[in-house]
Image (cartoon, rainbow, N blue to C red):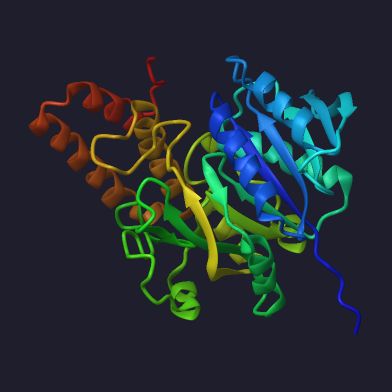
Amino acid sequence: MKYIEKKVWVVLLNWRNAPDTVECLESIVAAKDSAVAGVVVCDNASGDGSEVRIRSWLENNASSFSEVKWSDGAFSSLRTAGCEASGGAIQFALVHTGANLGFAGGNNVGIRYVQQSGGFDYLLLLNNDALLTPGAVSRMVGRFDEGGQVGMCGCTVVYHHTPSQVQAYGGASYSPWVGRAAHIGAHFPVEEPRDAASVEARLDYILGAALMISRPCLERTGLMEESYFLYFEEIDWAIRAAREGFSLGYVPDAVVYHKEGGTIGSSSRKGARSHLSEYYLILNRLRFTLKFYPWFLPSVFAFTVLQCARAVVSGDFPRLVVRLRAMFGLPLKT
């Protein structure tokens, strides 16, 4: 039987972080993975000149790229260009989303762009502060071919700042009792043996830093839920995919290096989480619980109260205010 190479489009979301986005693009080109057919960069109305730097990189590295605008539910072409450069046969697109649509909203614009093109088998949502390694995309595609009705697939995500430590084996397990996720394999040494089957048995969702979804899964599950703005989009997506009969996969030897929280300050390192990150994490924990696990709402709310108490004990009153506003659905004051 003749082998047909699968086409993967990579979707990157930029918001005020062009240096990391450009470095991510360079890692995709350097990987020279034949499975990568195209890359779409969505700029969430950064307003800091990000689009100028990204456009400049495309002009000097992309053999073919399009620049388009998303407005009123439709794409309009701004220009097409290209050069004899290192990008090879990869198609590139720079999409202006027109507003800060959040993680899901911005990525959904990129997904819609690829869907409109029609020529894809898989999509890889890749954080713009992540670096792709050679062979990672093709190995992830291979997991879908192994069967098991896999609809979403993850890889080994390694801390960029501590490359000897794993951030996650593909994704996380989730406790609905307290509304918290735990990255599988977090802080394990990279040389630790990894068993895909045991990881897959524990996965509740794939980490959004590097999430591949098949075309059939996307078509049956739909786009990511945009109302969250930040956080809980991945597990919401995974639950809806599971209801459509799809499972989650993990590829141990596909590796991505992740700077973690480069755009919004969401690093899990002590003291590193921004107020914006904290606010949406708590707000959407409660909203997600109400949507999928309403019977766990009392315990999740109690856990959040405990977090507020810890802020009081530590004297971190600005963070306490953020947590309280999130708990009661009040807007975050900036």
Residue 51 vs 240, above or below: the answer is above
Count how many numbered circles sit on residues in the image.
0
Q: In which quarter of the image is the C terminus?
A: top left
Q: Residue furthest left?
A: 313
* Residue 195 sits in quarter: bottom left
Residue 203 is situated, as x and y percent measured from the top left of the image, at 46, 67
* Residue 4 sits in quarter: bottom right
- Name which residue lies at 20% across and 34% down: 308
Residue 229 is situated, as x and y percent measured from the top left of the image, at 53, 34
Q: Is residue 125 left or right of residue 184?
A: right
* Residue 42 sits in quarter: top right
Q: In which quarter of the image is the N terminus?
A: bottom right
Residue 67 vs 252, above or below: the answer is above
Residue 178 is situated, as x and y percent measured from the top left of the image, at 30, 53
Q: Nearer the viewer, residue 125 or 217?
A: 125
Q: Which of 159 and 328 is in front in this view?
A: 159
**Can you see residue 142?**
yes
Residue 175 vs 38, above or below: the answer is below
Q: Is residue 201 left or right of residue 215?
A: left
Q: Which of 260 and 70 is in front in this view?
A: 260
Q: Residue furthest bottom?
A: 1
Residue 145 is situated, as x and y percent measured from the top left of the image, at 72, 76
- Name which residue lies at 79% across and 39% down: 92
- Name which residue lies at 64% across and 66% down: 140
**Can you see residue 105?**
no
